[in-house]
Image: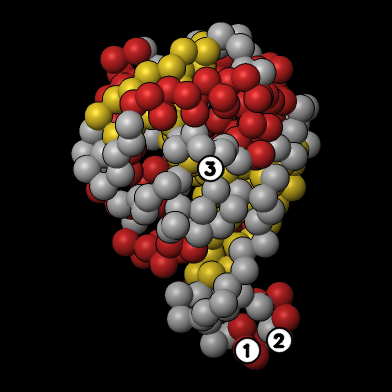
């Protein structure tokens, strides 16, 4: 993980996103990019004044966003964290959109950001991107994390997952719970799952780990139920099935979703 993208819009609870991003940045010595969503043509920076005048609402929103981000940047820099601002221009009528996010970045966002109907098209785009996504319903107090639940198919975990977990190991003391969740859509023999989890632990030299099998109708639901049972503070999930809106709306624990989610 090389940078943190603090993703907000004009309705965001910035305390949730910014406070969490700052905590992560301080512990991991990372730079924060405050990215503010504005509904405007993606090539806004290339438009002349006459073309921009055709989008009066966008001009107003951009001006408001500029003042907000300048205030946020001052707040972040007072905590001795490097920070920059970035406008994310998005038009739902455009196709082949590139948000410019990188695989080695972590996007931090509020759960309500994804639930807003106007952000639906952007949500689909975000979940088809490679960067990991940290989704929150309240500020993340990273220093209090003592138990992390990690779920995957465990056949072969992503290199970015390994790097993420090792980054956390370098800065926090916690127990790592590997859990394979059998769902209605995808089930596996328990012996296979256990062997795969043991292989992941050995190959990646993960410490303070335990392995479990859990049954649930959906993967995210199972991950949270298991976390609640084990006292988990953070979920790390590698996508193996499409994530539904209703799954996220019911999720209370912070979750990091790794890699693309429309496989």
- Real-space CA distance between mark 1 and mark 3, rounded to the nearest whole angstrom: 39 Å
Q: Give the quadrant of the C terminus.
A: bottom left
- Disc 1 or 3, which lies upstream in sequence? 1
Q: Is residue 170 left or right of residue 220?
A: right
Q: Residue at x 42, y 47 (%)?
A: 240
Q: Camera-side residue: 112 or 253?
A: 253
- Real-space CA distance between mark 2 and mark 3, rounded to the nearest whole angstrom: 39 Å
Q: Is residue 6 visible?
A: no
Q: Residue 32 is drawn in which quadrant?
A: top right
- Real-space CA distance between mark 1 and mark 2, rounded to the nearest whole angstrom: 5 Å
Q: Residue at x 41, y 28 (%)?
A: 193
Q: Which mark is residue 137?
A: none
Q: Is residue 49 visible?
A: yes
Q: Residue at x 56, y 9 (%)?
A: 208
Question: 104 above or below 152?
Answer: below
Q: Position of residue 187 (x, y in %)?
A: 29, 39
Query: What's the image's color scheme?
Result: secondary structure
Q: Camera-side residue: 235 or 239?
A: 239
Q: Give the quadrant of the N terminus.
A: top right
Whether the residues at callouts 1 and 2 have beta carbons within 8 Å, the answer is yes
Q: Residue furthest bottom?
A: 50
Q: Residue 4 is drawn in which quadrant?
A: top right
Q: Which mark is residue 51?
A: 1
Q: Residue at x 74, y 33 (%)?
A: 30
Q: Which structural element holds mark 2?
A: loop
Mark 2 or 3, closer to the camera: 3
Q: Which mark is residue 48?
A: 2
Q: Which mark is residue 258?
A: 3
Mark 1 is surrounded, within 10 Å at the Cα level, by few (under 14), some (14 to 19) or many (20 or more) other residues, namely few
Q: Which structural element holds mark 1?
A: helix
């Amino acid at each position: 993980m090389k940078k943190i993208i603090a993703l907000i819009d004009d309705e965001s609870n910035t305390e949730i996103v910014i406070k969490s991003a700052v905590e992560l940045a301080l512990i991991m010595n990372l730079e924060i990019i405050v990215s503010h969503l504005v509904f405007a043509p993606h090539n806004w920076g290339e438009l002349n004044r006459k073309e921009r005048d055709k989008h009066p609402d966008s001009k107003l929103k951009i001006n408001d966003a500029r003042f907000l981000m300048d205030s946020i940047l001052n707040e972040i820099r007072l905590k001795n964290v490097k920070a920059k601002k970035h406008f994310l221009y998005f038009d739902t009528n455009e196709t082949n959109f590139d948000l410019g996010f990188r695989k080695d970045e972590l996007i931090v966002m509020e759960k309500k950001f994804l639930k807003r109907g106007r952000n639906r098209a952007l949500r689909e785009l975000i979940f088809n991107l490679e960067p990991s996504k940290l989704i929150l319903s309240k500020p993340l107090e990273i220093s209090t994390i003592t138990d992390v639940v990690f779920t995957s198919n465990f056949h072969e975990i992503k290199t970015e997952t390994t790097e993420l977990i090792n980054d956390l190991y370098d800065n926090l003391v916690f127990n790592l719970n590997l859990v394979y969740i059998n769902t209605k859509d995808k089930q596996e023999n328990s012996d296979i799952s256990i062997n795969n989890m043991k292989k992941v632990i050995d190959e990646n030299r993960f410490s303070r780990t335990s392995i479990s099998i859990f049954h649930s109708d959906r993967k995210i639901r199972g991950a949270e139920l298991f976390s609640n049972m084990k006292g988990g503070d953070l979920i790390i999930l590698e996508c193996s099935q499409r994530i539904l809106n209703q799954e996220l709306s019911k999720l209370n624990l912070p979750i990091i979703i790794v890699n693309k989610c429309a496989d």
